[in-house]
Image (tube, rainbow, N blue to C red):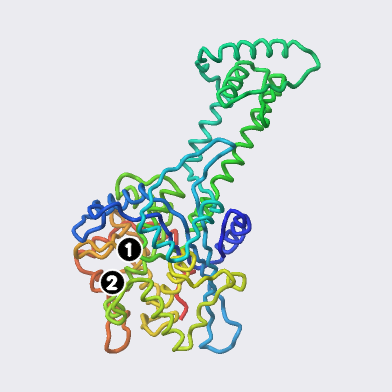
Amino acid sequence: MDVTRDNFGQALAEFRLAISTCDFAAIDLEMTGLYEDRARQPSHLDTKDDRYFKLFQSVQSYGVIQVGICLFSWVDSKSDEPKDGGYYEARPFNFNVFPCTSVAGFPVEAHFGCKNTAFEFLARNSFDFNKWVYQGIPFLNADQADRIRADRVSLLTKRQPQMEVNEQHKPFVKTLETTLRKFMKTKGERQLRYDTANSYERKLVYDVVARHNTLGTRSRHGCIEIFKGTRKAMARHVAQKIHALNASIEDARGFCQIIDILSAARKPVVGHNMLLDVMHAHAKFYKPLPATRRGFGSNLSRFLPILIDTKYIIESTPAIKARYRTSNLDEIAPMLERESMRSNTHGMIRNHPQFTRDVTHTMHEAGFDAYMTGATFIRLLNLEGELDLSAAPVSSELVLYRYINRLYVALGDELYWNLTEDSAKESRAWRAANSHAKALGDDVFAVDSATSLSDDSCSADEDDQSSSSADASFFDDLAPELDALSLRQ
């Protein structure tokens, strides 16, 4: 489903309903650029803090123009055939997003850079820039919304310092004050229309009227309407303005409502090389990024608590890497799809009937990339491909625990950043998963009798023991979500 501001209300309702029953979500973001120069690009020599700072700079510099979210739900087959156990139903959403430009008639400014090569790349992939600007869904994160609300409510409820009036407009203010005194003394006359020639005069009218507790204003085309009322009536008027302001802010938050729903659902979120995408989503649609890597990791346990990176799955599993010789999504996804077609398991992933007409099959459209990311995740874990990652009933769970919250970073000999590594206490679920993995050994992850799929880079050596004792305390709380994602064989 291609979503713009015109059909956002419908998409929001469908997304809210669909996420309650989905097993996991896959995401992808398209940005206006990546890195300003070579010095700011990721390097294998980076420390984790260096890498976070470089990605932090990228997020601060560039904007998000499209967000793809594809929801995957398992559907049990009605067939009695044992081999026909069911399929995953996909609902891809392609959200075109553009920063909010106004709230309650007041301008909101957003600044972001763009890179010529990024725009050329988007243009080559048929990106519609006019649709992005004119029909993009507005967004305003929670911190921005709170700041605007506080500023506007303060203007409505607190007496503001009087404006300094230049010499040219002192006669205008004097005439206005005289008119207001007569208006307040006149019985029966409830409203007064006052003409203004420019925005400065309008500000002067608002400023002078605000000094009177029994006068209020309404903006009209070409003039300002001034009306009288009791203190109680004025209080009701202010309350109505605050209510209208809150409604306007909620509308301006726009796409952030989708991210709020995704965050509250606490579903597993799958991405490909997803760290930069997650940082952009945090900064643009949730709250500003923390200054430190550890602060960001802590926030993720509340923002998106279960993350799975398909690039890490590929890079950390030697048999997968050897077989496909690539971990790029636009290369490995078609390979896996062709394999599923040859093995007659292509129907294991199907689009929901209402989500077929808008599928473009164009890589680098966020909605389609999110769909391909989710499909790749399913096929990598043997829901539709030929790689057999399981040799025991519990192995699907163990595979998931090996990959949860390990985001691909490629730092020297380190493949991943374990988001839970800085915590002190190990959860019961994490201990149980690791004890099972150690007891069962590498055979659990065998492709066949000849090929091992053990994850050498994250096996139970001393380096990995530090992460196995990391804080995964939230895994206990997330047991229902992980059970829902138990891989159907």
The reply to whether callout 2 and callout 1 are in contact (CB within 8 Å) is yes
Kindly report the distance in space between the C-alpha atoms of the residues bearing marks 2 and 1.
10 Å
Is 425 situated above or below 214?
A: below
- Residue type at mark 1 is Arg
- Residue type at mark 2 is Ser
Residue 233 is situated, as x and y percent measured from the top left of the image, at: 71, 24
Residue 353 is situated, as x and y percent measured from the top left of the image, at: 61, 73
Q: Nearer the viewer, residue 218 or 27?
A: 218
The first of marks 2 and 1 along the sequence is 2
In the rendered image, is residue 458 in sight?
yes
Q: Which residue in the structure is indicated by mark 2? A: 316
Outermost residue toward the right?
A: 188
Under circle 1, the secondary element is: strand
Is 488 situated above or below 202?
A: below
Is 259 situated above or below 237?
A: below
Instruction: Categorize mark 1 by other alpha carbons within 10 Å: few (<14), some (14-19), many (20+).
Output: many
